[in-house]
Image: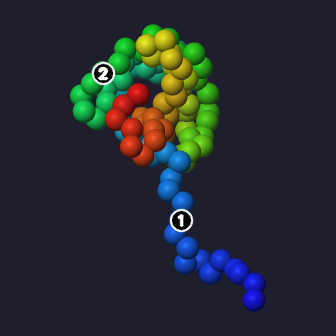
Amino acid sequence: MSSTNTGNSPLPPPLAKRAYVGVYTYTNPQGQVIPTRIRWEDGKEWEIDRVLDIRPGTARKAGGAGLRYLLRIAGQEREIFLVDGRWFAEVSPDAQGF
């Protein structure tokens, strides 16, 4: 007798979830949106030290395609995504912030 997956086995837990965040932005004269500060769900805020890269991208762990912003926050590189007018970060399911 061979073992086959009948489709009833539980799905693995997600690699990450979307944490929707508030983002303060500056729009330059060319129309490019530049994030300057991030506000987490609990009200904690982080200043963005530098925007390192902006390009079309996909949130590989949580899903979604839009603009990927690579940022330096408190000396560490972090990614946030702008998809359909909403900002989010990919975080582990038990994360409490960046």
Write down the residue under mark 1: 11
Write down the residue under mark 2: 45
**Mark 1 residue element:** loop
Structural distance between the alpha carbons of marks 1 and 2: 34 Å
* Figure check: 45 above or below 21: above
- Residue at image point 35% right, 18% down: 46
Q: Closer to us: mark 1 or mark 2?
A: 1
Residue type marked 2: Glu
* Residue 49 in view in this figure: yes
**Mark 2 residue element:** strand
* Figure check: 67 above or below 52: below
Q: Residues within 10 Å of mark 1 (few under 14, many from 20)?
A: few
Residue 62, percent from left and from top? 52, 46
* Figure check: 7 above or below 74: below
| Quarter of image, res 25 | top left
Q: Is residue 57 left or right of residue 13?
A: right
Residue 52, percent from left and from top? 57, 16
Q: Which one is nearer the viewer's eye here, 6 or 52?
A: 6
Which quadrant, please, contains the C terminus? top left
Residue type marked 1: Leu
- Residue at image point 53% right, 48% down: 15
- Residue at image point 43% right, 20% down: 35
Q: Which one is nearer the viewer's eye here, 78 or 38?
A: 78
